[in-house]
Amino acid sequence: MKIRSILPGDLEQVRALLGANGWAHRVGDPDRFADLVSKSQRTAVAVVDERVVGFARALCDNQSNGYLSMLVVSPGHRRQGIGRALVDHIVGNDCRITWMLRADRAGAREFFAKLGFAASSVAMERTRKPPRITRSDSPGASPRKR
Ligand SMILES: CC(C)(COP(=O)(O)OP(=O)(O)OC[C@H]1O[C@@H](n2cnc3c(N)ncnc32)[C@H](O)[C@@H]1OP(=O)(O)O)[C@@H](O)C(=O)NCCC(=O)NCCS
């Protein structure tokens, strides 16, 4: 098993892995997904026999704050240390950085607790909403007169 940063040739495998494991609503559009990954300062893929079996990405300012997102290991490769190795690759060893994440999937809290994460008493969040469809966006709307 090898852990490395993502390469352009991995994108479709990673998108399929995420799509099959609960992120289908986030990765449906290949161009938007490529853009999302390109804007993630840190990425990691786990590769076994030249197949991508794990992925993680993070936003990070490399000084004080990081946000770990989209961590996934394919079901057939779980409980072998791959999730931990992906997080280690992303987080590195700079202890001046505070890392945040959402642990809302089954087993995620237990997993992250093993890696030294603890529930926050200070974090807040404003969650994303689906985009509002305005009349001019809706199918069949006639172009607005100016
Ligand atoms: C969470 C996930 C990434 C873990 O990957 P993994 O490769 O199985 O994890 P590891 O093998 O590296 O496990 C590291 C430690 O966490 C523990 N662990 C892993 N999954 C666990 C679970 N569901 N419940 C309790 N403990 C768990 C392991 O036993 C191991 O403990 P140890 O170090 O004492 O042996 C994987 O289950 C997954 O992809 N889940 C679906 C997506 C998800 O929930 N992502 C995280 C939130 S975005």
Image (spheres, grey):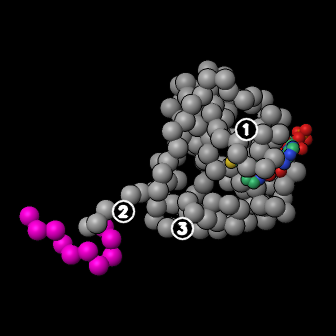
> Which residue position holds label 2?
133
Q: Mark 3 and mark 1 in contact (Cβ < 8 Å)?
A: no
Q: Secondary structure at mark 1?
A: helix
> Which residue position holds label 1?
88
Instruction: Identify which residue is drawn at 66% across, 35% down.
Output: 91
Instruction: Identify which residue is drawn at 68% across, 53% down.
Output: 55
Quadrant, the N terminus: bottom right
Answer left or right for 35 relative to 87: left
Q: Is mark 1 within 8 Å of ligand 1?
A: no
Residue 28, which numbered label? Answer: 3
Q: Observer-nearest residue: 88 or 36? A: 36
Task: Identify residue type, mark 2.
Answer: Ile
Q: Residues within 10 Å of mark 1 (few under 14, many from 20)?
A: some
Task: Identify residue type, mark 1.
Answer: Asp
Q: Residues within 10 Å of mark 3 (few under 14, many from 20)?
A: some
Answer left or right for 139 relative to 108: left
- Is residue 112 placed above or below 37 in the rendered structure? above
Residue lying farthest to the bottom in this orientation:
140
Q: Look at the image and say whether residue 141 sits in the magenta stretch.
A: yes
* Magenta region: 137-146
Task: Identify residue type, mark 3.
Answer: Gly
Report x, y in % for residue 8. 54, 61
Counting residues from the start of the chain, the first of labels 2 and 1 encountered is: 1
- Is residue 92 placed above or below 35 in the rendered structure? above
Q: Look at the image and say whether residue 83 sits in the magenta stretch.
A: no
- Is residue 27 placed above or below 40 in the rendered structure? below
Q: Main secondary structure of the magenta part?
A: loop
Q: For residue 3, say whether it is visible.
A: no
Residue 20, which numbered label? Answer: none
Marks 2, 1: nearer the viewer: 2
Alpha carbons under labels 3 and 2: distance apart: 19 Å
Instruction: Identify which residue is drawn at 67% across, 33% down.
Output: 92
